[in-house]
Image (cartoon, rainbow, N blue to C red):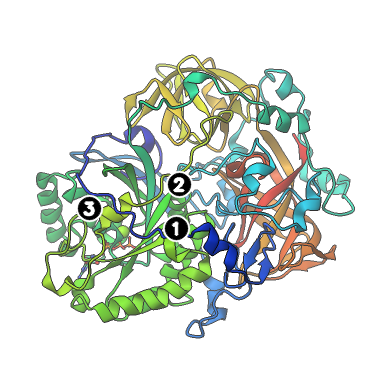
Amino acid sequence: MKMGANWLTALMHVSFCLPTECYLFHKTAETPSQKETIKHSVWRCSICTYDNDETMSSCDICGVLHGPLLNNSIYDKKRTANIFDLKSSRVSSTVVGRDEAVKVSSMRSDSSNLSTEKGKHNRLDEINILKNIEVGPPAGSRTSDNCSASVPEGWLDHVDESSVAVNLQSSVKRSLSLMPKERNVMVDDSSSSRNGGEANSLTSNLENISFAAKSGHSNDANPGRANSRAQYKPEKWMLPEKAEHSLTQLNLAIVGHVDSGKSTLSGRLLHLLGRISQKEMHKYEKEAKLQGKGSFAYAWALDESAEERERGITMTVAVAYFDSKRYHVVVLDSPGHKDFVPNMITGATQADASILVIDASIGSFEAGMDGTKGQTREHAQLIRSFGVDQLIVAVNKMDAVDYSKERFDLIISQLGTFLRSCGFKDSSVSWIPLSAVENQNLVSAPSNFRLSWYHGPNLLDAIDSFQPPTREFSKPLIMPICDVIKSPSQGQVSACGKLEAGAVRSGSKVLVMPSATIATVRSLERDSQACPIGRAGDNIAVSLNGIDGNHVMAGGVLCHPDFPIAFAKHLELKVLVLDGATPILIGSQLEFHIHHAKEAARVARISSLLDSKTGKVAKKAPRCILAKQSAVVEVILQEAICVEEFSKCKVLGRVFLRTLGRTVAVGIVTRIVEEQ
Ligand code: GTP
Ligand code: MG
């Protein structure tokens, strides 16, 4: 099925548990004594201020690169300029059932032309690029003094108990400009305490900004909200019972350079695991052959649109699933072509873990590593930026290099260096040589004697070796809305998305933001089946009662009525301008992307440049931010969006900024300067 409208409800859950052994083969625990005896000098991350060991080329906490992208001279540093070169893209949403593919909807988005997006359904979810950036306290907050202090790993989790851990977002984004201007009655004390009133016009906002002298002011726009979130006590039913033995859901993004075999590998895996029947496979083979695309038969299971099949490339993220021994795996098969990077981001933002598919063929691996056009590099860097730190490198098409160990080793050596520079730890990366076409090393040990030199796990074992994702069960409800299903005839509306925190069940009252309207949960669906409770980590469709369908919108958020999230257009951000990107100036017009929403934004102020080593203010009020510099800026959005400070809610506080189809900066929301 294709990611997009209604895909959540289209997920069909059929348990298929393969009796595989679980190998924890790549985790090598470091003993405390080892840790203590090894002492290196450190460098401080300019974004999160974590003190990293000098041997780390990127921040161990947030993945931000330290110094140049690569030390390896075989790569041309300047050529990394184009890694975020994005163009328009199309997302078609289709659903593949077990028996046949059904087209559900098709939408178009051009990320380079934001202003024309108003009123359309924007399907490109380029949000949460900073999934992994766990930053220090908001610049200027009460805790800002700690910014330069050495902090232990994972410290952010303790900075603010209201902080909601990162999970993954679903796929759909629509501009919040679609929201009706008038908003419904505020529903309770906490919501009515927000800054109300009409939104200021962009011009008047710019004229009337009361600029803080520096980043570092009290940045808690609504301290009451933060405190109350910390005091939240979940009800018993919200927490999973120990007796529940359902498989943990693992969202698995399949990424990699164009034509590396991602769809073929995914299709083959699904076929081997019984998710695609023999009959269906025959059908794909026959049709593919008829169109002269015989080698794409397995890929056709995921590449469903006529255009994808004709061109032989994936254009949109396909969603499928299977059950392994440990996980209910949601496969997110991403496009590899650079024109469809925004769609790849759609899948990657939801990933708990990822498979990076490499084409081992001579010249193809090298093409993927090319600094200008190579999506191996770009995808690896992007998924790490989203917080994915568990990776399988599937070295595919080994049949094309005669299953050569030398070729495999060369790929490990060259790509391994790059992955380290992206912030992947060696211990969290598994390398699996395989052939999707010849079915070698996918779900069982290789049968081809030429691969007899390999003694590691097969692909499925490696998937089962991923660490389970953490979920925020005991936090107040947060569900960014990725899609809305309306049934006007029955007067029903359902919000779809991934529960990032908390839980809901039938009868629960939820606050629908930004309309600030209370609705009652009528029923829930998970994998197209009714379910009694949805908990953090679940992809669900929430059918709502007591609300006008126009007030439920992708880009909005379902939250707990007592813990409303913010709705704002004037924000302070900490940003890192990417290597090779054009400088950001005061007045720069950018696309602002956050969870499932994007808005036009203007850089209203550059408060300070931050020292990349210490994270301290290096220069106040600079005129521009150059590539690889980090800074504190204020942006004013054209329309308000649902947002939170990153320290309070990671998933609603990660942003990235784009212009002319390219991502120029990633960042986090450090302060909501003014709420609507
Ligand atoms: P995009 O989604 O467009 O980036 O491509 P992809 O990575 O999904 O590649 P796809 O699965 O469409 O396969 C591209 C071509 O590689 C097809 O012709 C496949 O038959 C071929 N291919 C895939 N896996 C293998 C393999 O293991 N060995 C060989 N020799 N060819 C393969
Ligand atoms: Mg593909």
Q: Locate residue 332 relative to residue 502 in the image: left or right.
A: left
Q: Is residue 18 left or right of residue 84?
A: left
Contact between marks 1 and 3 (CB within 8 A): the answer is: no
Crowding around mark 2 (Cα neighbors within 10 Å: few <14, some 14 to 19, many 20+) is many
Query: Distance of mark 1 from mark 3, alpha carbons?
Result: 30 Å
Residue 29: assigned label: 1
Q: Nearer the viewer, mark 1 or mark 2?
A: 1
Residues marked 1 and 2 touching at CB (< 8 Å): no
- The x and y percentages for residue 177 are 62, 39
Q: Nearer the viewer, mark 1 or mark 3?
A: 1
| CA–CA distance in space, label 1 to label 2 | 27 Å
Q: Which element is circle 1 on?
A: loop
Residue closer to the observer: 92 or 400 = 400
471 above or below 388? Answer: above
Q: Which percent across, then down, holds residue 276? A: 18, 45
Q: Is mark 2 within 8 Å of ligand 2?
A: no
